[in-house]
Image: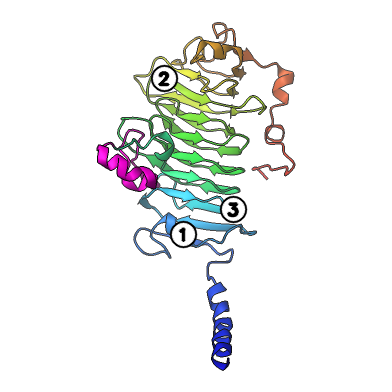
Amino acid sequence: MKQLLTTILALLAFMPMLAADKYDNPDTIVVARDGTGQFRTVTDAIEVCRAFMDYHKVIFVKKGTYKEKVIMPQWLQNIEICGEDRDQTIITYDDHANIAMDGNYWPAQLKQQLLAMGDRPKLGTFRSFTVRVDANNITFKNITIENNAARLGQAVALHTQGDRLTFINCRFLGNQDTVYTGMPGTRLYFKDCYIEGTVDFIFGPSTAWFEQCHIFCKSNSYITAASTPQEIMYGYIFNKCTVTTAPEVTKLYLGRPWRDYGYTLFMHCSLPAAIRPEGWHHWQVEREKTARYLEFENTGDGAATDKRVAWSRQLTKKEAKEITLENVFKRADEWNPTF
């Protein structure tokens, strides 16, 4: 009995040591590839953050190239990942959809069967990400997220699942499917960001506001592929953005609906001559009946509306006044990323 009591007392004395976490505070964590920070990878810094933090914590990432697949799990919140220099602080990876999966991805019950068959399933679009954000209330600033895979299939740079995500002065580099906003009903805010790609390179079901962003198109194709659910009022809104193209690009669509009811609005944007006169593509002809494709007071050589497809629409001034951050992001939590 005495020995048992001694053991219990020892454990009780040890418990505060187990609970103590020197990173469980609002202090900034520094990441540096050269070893001058507390961590050498972004993933390692994320791992020490406490679940469901009620304070704001910054992970400051020094200039450098960080080759890693980064996942921010859903139990995190209130984290800001801030780069030292947008163009010189780069998180990069090179997966694409048609890579044969490593055995670690396979369900255990299929692993032996697949190995026996000599068949290796493909990675697929939704595992190709460089950064995936499953958490809520996350901010990225002054950083580049890149998928530099060869043009051999879909290759996502940023994959989002969380709500109330903010991206300020970031770059998103890739080819097909650069930015995937992957969860219906979630809200994303992009401000002063640069996004480049080839095919459908901004796609998914989320509600996302792009403010004064630079959209760079690298091939004749489609900028957006929204899959906004019918019950969600708003999908993609591009406000005061600038669209530019590579010199060889001459035939570009503003978007095509990945699913029925896709919603995309370009307003007060500068559109290049490469935008096709019809503006939009239906993907499948029956989607003309449900696609919500809108424009308002755009400028530039590609902004003429007289030859736009009949199933797209120009907003009236009264309607345009209702398109505000407050209305688009309106929920019970009254989130406004510009506060």
Element class at badge 2? loop
Identify which residue is drawn at 50% across, 29% down. Answer: 203
Q: Is residue 108 magenta?
A: yes
Element class at badge 1? helix
Q: In this view, does 61 lie to the left or right of 17?
A: left
Q: In this view, does 180 lie above or below 18?
A: above
Q: In this view, does 92 lie to the left or right of 231?
A: left
The span from disc 2 to disc 1 (Cα, nearest Å) is 38 Å
Query: Identity of the amino acid at label 1?
Result: Ala
Q: Give the range drawn in magenta.
A: 90-119
Label whose residue precedes the other's in the sequence (2 or 1): 1
What x and y, as percent, mark residue 57?
A: 57, 58
Identify which residue is drawn at 58% across, 78% down. Answer: 16
Q: Residue 221 carries which label?
A: 2
Identify which residue is drawn at 43% across, 34% down. Answer: 178
Label whose residue precedes the other's in the sequence (2 or 3): 3
In this rendered view, identify the residue nearer to me: 165 or 270.
Answer: 165
In this rendered view, identify the residue nearer to me: 19 or 191.
Answer: 19
The span from disc 2 to disc 3 (Cα, nearest Å) is 36 Å
Residue 88 visible, this angle:
no
Q: Name the residue under label 1.
A: 45
